[in-house]
Image (tube, grey):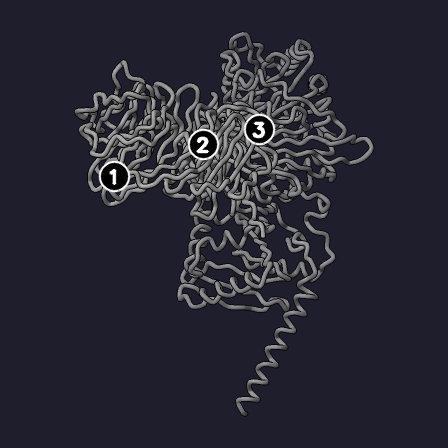
Amino acid sequence: MSKKLFAILTALLLLAALASYVYYRRTQAAVPVDPWALVPDDAVLVAATRDHPTLVRHLKETQLWDNLLTVRYFESLQNNVALVDSLTGSRNVIARFLGRKKVLTSVHVTGPNQFDLLLQVPVTSIREYRQVRSLLDALQRDPQFRVGTRDYEGTILNEVTEVGTGHGVTFFNYRNHLLLSANPALVEAVVRRLAGPNQPTVAADFQNIDFFRLRDVDATVLVNYRRLPQLLGVFFRRELLSDMSQVTSLASIGQMEMKLAGNKVALSGFANPETTRGSLHERLRGQPTQRLRMADVLSSRTAMLVHLGLGPATILRGQRRAAIVPDTLAPGVTVLLDSLAAGFQQEVALCYLTQASARVNPTRLALAYCPQPARQALLLGQLRRAMGTSPSFERVGPYRLYATGVPEMPARLLGPLFGGFRQPVVAVVGNYLVFGQDAAALRQLLNDVVAGEVWARSPAQVGFLQETQPMARLRVILDTRNAWNLLLRGLVEERRAGLLRNEPLFKRFPQIALQFTPTGDETEAEPQYFTELLLRHPLTGPAVARVQGASATGAALTFKTPLFGPPILTAAATTGRSGVLVQDSARVLHYVTPENVVAWSDSLPGPMVGTMQRRLVAGRPSYLLATAGQLHLLDANGRSAPNFPLNLPDSVQATALSVSPEGNGAPRLLVAGGGGNLFLYDTDGNEYPGWQPKRFDFNLAAPPLYLVVGGRDIIVVLLENGYVYACDIQGNVYPGFPISVGARLQGTALVETGATPSRTRLTVVSQHGEQVTFSLAGDVVSRARVATWSRNSVFRLIPDQRQRSYVVAREEGGQFDLFEPTGRRLLSRKFITSGLKPTQFFDFDGSRRVYVVTEPGPRRAYVYDRQGRLLGGQPFESSATAVGLEYDARNKSFYLYRTVGTELRRTDIEEIGDRR
């Protein structure tokens, strides 16, 4: 065959392949697929996530991220993510691939003690197809993995197996949806489901509900309550599943939205009632919802509470009153039990108290509300006489504890959910009858009630109950700290080690509440239940995180006292986002991590003055700052260095702190003491001769500049009268100084450090609008007019955050103008107030420049881009005279940090595209 003919045939084959691909894309793959149709029917839980970058950020802000990474499953997932990055030669491949796609993760019970996950990820472009193909090729070349395919009912399944361990993943692509699982049976179940495409989906009852249309939603969770006991059976002992099945039989299936907000995770949505015969919903159907009124008799040691709101409690007994034990009681006793049961109404509960060890049986109590407790006490006395039980009692405070003599009495009165009380004891506590499985159990509760150790007197518990729904039919409330041993005892043996490993995650949210409330009139139809699952951490520590505003464009941290001064950004070593230092009105300095968590707090004797300096001291990152009477050196954890704080003389009130540049030995500390007085110290507290103090005739126009040029310390002092001094470390004035700029000064200078003093340039702007550049040899290099001036105008040089470039601000009354050094006007605005407006200039690699003008009167910060456009479309509220700002190049957005009253807010602002 000739080369020409071979080339023609090759071209034809390529064209045919391209045509086939285009046909597939335009016909089959172009038809949208309902992702829920690909989820097998036996799914117990299905989580849907969409905005994964925001989800990860919220997990970090709620302090869940670090806890999740300690879970073995997530550790393995993190290792796999690192492996993918290594094989592809790129970073964050998985995070970029997921992006803002809608991803479904379903949980399935696949064995007696096993569950597995099925993951569904859309593939939205040819580029992503190539990424998947490239990853497969890389795995195929790696000797640690074996890559292959197999046919299952006409569908080609891909399998990747790790050599040696046998662990792997099975996946296939169905019309631009990648389905994968570590269990091949789940992928095969998807293939079988596709054989009948018209089957109803697991979310068929909620197909018209899209929680992602609402704001602040991080994920949605579908719960199959009918299959939930199967999943619980993977973790808990078999004898507990009967009680769990009774509680979960209130609903059949439900879907909830999930929001991560500060100290809590809130899930809320709707659930369909379980209409099968004998279900909890059928027994409670038509009953009124109730408040939780028994907080006065619930011990602070309560581990778990199952609370039912209803009308008459007799509906719980049903037709089989003796379902727990054979009814061998005398007829008179049965009549008395019926009379007792008729006196219970509104609320009943099953309560578990904390236990000292996982080896002892759990302490169980049953509580029932009775509007006529005296009548119930009389019936209990008659019942004791009828059973021949001793009338003796044990006194605990004002309460009497009696034996009942009736086995399984709570179950006979309140139904099978209250079984397990073989020889119960009883006491009347207020309007409640409380049954204990033995005297010791009930004694614990009564002692706590007498001591006032109850929910109603616990601020943390009262705050938690106030955040839950006021009315509900079913409540399950869990205190994970009190329930630790209870859970250890209830778990199957092979799951206990996992709970112990993940103790920090489990106790991260110690307060958990699950509630069901009917949404309509049950006499006419079967209304849905409004369902809420709340996981909450009590408000402890100096601040509480939350998502900022309704638009979820950032986060806020609420402190207990108002914040004082601006936020100070500090670069973090492990992340591209900065940490923040803020001080509150109680004079406490707080360090907030990039994850929006207060890492440490340190009390100061007064407000910070001047600018905080970050330096390496003895090779460790440290913070240097001043208060009016002291100098402080704090390490990265907020601890004071040896010999600190340094105490200034009683007559000195510090107004600013300047520190020698990094990389020039131990820091030297230059303190402006007011009235033109300067003091110089080293970090051991030694004073430098000639600086005790160094006095100047006029006030300083700006904090002094501490420079090191050619190995020599040079301190530049700008005075308000327009004179500039340069002094050495002994306080002597350098030759050529002082120099005069010809007019008054109000602002700092921009320094361009050279190899020698003569090559080092400083630029200032005088109140005549003149830009003056001079060297440290005392020579004026240039003068140039930036803008016109008048008697009422004020000029200030505004350097950028890295002291590399500058702009010039001119103010006259309410008129504000901003100029480049060349005199080109950048911004011109007329403000309502006439006071000076603090101005900041941010330059991010020269391509993105931002100007922030703060109006202290109305407490607004105006953020402009280089074209004078207002970022965010409106000013931002700000209590301080300055803000913090940084730029995220990957997401093309700015992070604005500001203080508003008691809040530290971080707002994400999208960058405005350049005009074409």
Q: x, y (%) of residue 226?
A: 66, 42
Q: Quadrant of residue 420?
A: top right
Mark-to-mark CA distance, 3 and 1: 50 Å
Q: Amino acid at mark 3?
A: Ile
Query: Taking 706 as reference, is 288 above or below it?
Result: above
Pick the front one: 518 or 678: 678
Q: Which residue is mark 3?
A: 477
Please give left or right for residue 641 compared with residue 23 in the image: left
Q: Dot 3: what SS?
A: strand
Q: Is residue 510 visible?
A: no
Q: Which residue is mark 1?
A: 619
Marked residue nearer the N-terminal end (2 or 1): 2
Q: Nearer the viewer, mark 2 or mark 3?
A: 3
* Residue with the most extreme right position: 524
Q: Amino acid at mark 2?
A: Ala
Q: Which mark is residue 358?
A: 2
Pick the front one: 583 or 452: 583
Q: Quadrant of residue 580?
A: top left
